[in-house]
Image (cartoon, rainbow, N blue to C red):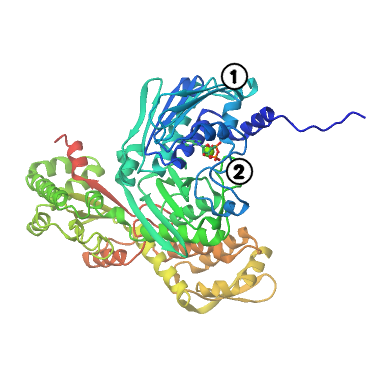
Amino acid sequence: MPQRISILPEIITNKIAAGEVVERPASVIKELIENSLDADAGDITVEIAAGGRRLIKISDNGHGMSREDALLSLERHATSKIRTDSDLDGILTLGFRGEALPSIASVSRFRLATREPASLEGTEIIVEGGRVKEVRACGMAPGTVITVEQIFFNTPARLKFLRSAETETGHVGDTVARMAISRPDVAFTCISDGRELLRVQRGDLRRRLSQTLGKDAAADLHAVDCSDNGISVTGFISGPNNVRSTTAAMFTYINGRFVRDKVVQHAIMQAYRGVIDRGRYPILALFVTLPPGEVDVNVHPTKHEVRFRRQPVVHDALQKAIEEVLRRSPWLAHPQEQAAPSSPATSQAYRERIAAAAQASLNLPRRETSYYAATSSCDKVVTRAFAASPAPSEAAAVSEPAAPFQPEAADSKKQGFFSSLAIIGQFHAEYILCQSGSELVVIDQHAASERVAYQRLRQQCEATGVESQRLLFPETLELSFTETAVAQRFQEDLARIGFELEPFGGNTIIVAAVPRMAAGNSSIQLVRDILAELAALGTSAAFREKLDELLARIACHSVVRGIPPLDNRQINELLRSMDETDFAASCPHGRPVSHTIKLAELEKIFKRT
Ligand code: ADP
Ligand code: MG
């Protein structure tokens, strides 16, 4: 019998490994940048031609390799990053598998040139389709230059999967940006067909983000810095007005490695739930750092996925770190103050701008008020804001900026952003109009009340349970089978959120008490809604999962629609409670509570700029 099984020659196993690691030019670039970073490079340049199909070239000023190491580096499983089995549990480098170079070299025309700083000359190795063609000495600056030409020239099936040059270039740009964000201390340049896609100098993370994500996106980013349980979370996150419809601007890193991880993503969205709409995603760059033994990066050849040893702990640490920032609603403070909280020059310039803006609003001729008051309702809001602004007290408040503009008081919650507002009045019995320096702040009264109610319910729930009110005449309620089952199964949980429901036989229950806040306002309908919601969840699921939604529903019921216009005292009270409320800027359904119209925007409308 002939032998059926044979061990594959290395040239084939490398090609097979390449199938996993080298999907497209961008994946080659990811691997090579990782190697440059592992070699302590401070400056990395990426050049591509035709989307990387024709040429990929990466140059770094890292520690380079000796001739022997350079030759070894092209062998499969040759690595300088781990030596023993136990090293696998403490990986601090980006690479460790020893697969990238041989894989890439097996599917391209490959050139490696490298020089150690102490060495007088470099080594140049030419490889074609995995076969070493030439090894010679070469003159070069210390560091490493890797050139990959005609990727997939010997694997036509792969070549077919490459997209247009523009698409591949896009992927390359994204990859370089992703890695550039992870290391603001390293300079990156990316050139495509001679055109500069990205050039970033060494700097801090905020600057790097504004260079890679754009100034607009970076203007509303708030620092996260939290350390708990051996897990640290740092970086920047956007406020709820700065969101995207995809997850593309969510940059998450575990121990410096870019990952797309379900646990991480879930924790983020949990933190933002109730602050942004469903289907919207924040802009963020977050770095989770934990002891290397806590995370297994050896899950997937591209290392885009990881496994956590204590998954719930990581999840909660991340969620908590983000919530801590969102709770303070820092985007309500002025971005100028945020960018440089301790820079007197900036705050001085800012005060001057506010003063100038105030002057402009004081000079607004009365005549315009009456003219525009006759136009659309939207214009009315605008003109009323100005008509009210030239009050002496407010003029004084502007030249002597109110608390939110003072750098020593960057925490908007403490000094009460909402109570610091000057009330202009109410619009359509639905919106409260206020002035903050040179800005017009419009508050959705219903959404605001709902947020306040929701937050109180949450606090009560976390403390002793939601306050309930016994009904004078308990009502009976006929339910479906599932609803009855749900009412019984969750009887205790429901009591904790203020509902006392007692079985009455069959599918009938007695409603003895309801949350005090929602008492009176069609509270029976509320019980039905709550039970229907729980029934949709099924009896096996955890009550906790639905808790926030249920509380939001109670909050919604507690706020009467179509209430008569509020007087100033009631408005003041609402504004004060908003300051005491975490996440005050969004209603529990994620809709915004307040909207700010800048003076500049109004000036644009009135063609004053
Ligand atoms: P890994 O990164 O998993 O170790 P690679 O195949 O990517 O495997 O690289 C093999 C080895 O070659 C690395 O361990 C490293 O020692 C060396 N090497 C690769 N690229 C560079 C570089 N740019 N500068 C210095 N050494 C490098
Ligand atoms: Mg590597």
In the foreground, 307 or 399: 307
Q: Residues within 10 Å of mark 2 (few under 14, many from 20)?
A: few
Picture coordinates of residue 242 (x, y %)?
A: 36, 45
Picture coordinates of residue 507 (x, y %)?
A: 67, 69
Q: Which residue is mark 1?
A: 153
Query: Image quarter for residue 429?
Result: bottom left
Picture coordinates of residue 475 (x, y %)?
A: 56, 74
In the foreground, 289 or 3: 3
In the picture provided, is 214 more to the left or to the right than 256? left
The quadrant the N terminus occupies is: top right
The mark total stands at 2
Please tell me whether residue 196 is drawn above or below residue 342 in the rendered image: above
The residue most toward the right is 1
In the foreground, 381 or 109: 109
At x 11%, y 41%, the residue is 368
At x 22%, y 42%, the residue is 379
The quadrant the C terminus occupies is: top left
Q: Which residue is mark 2?
A: 300
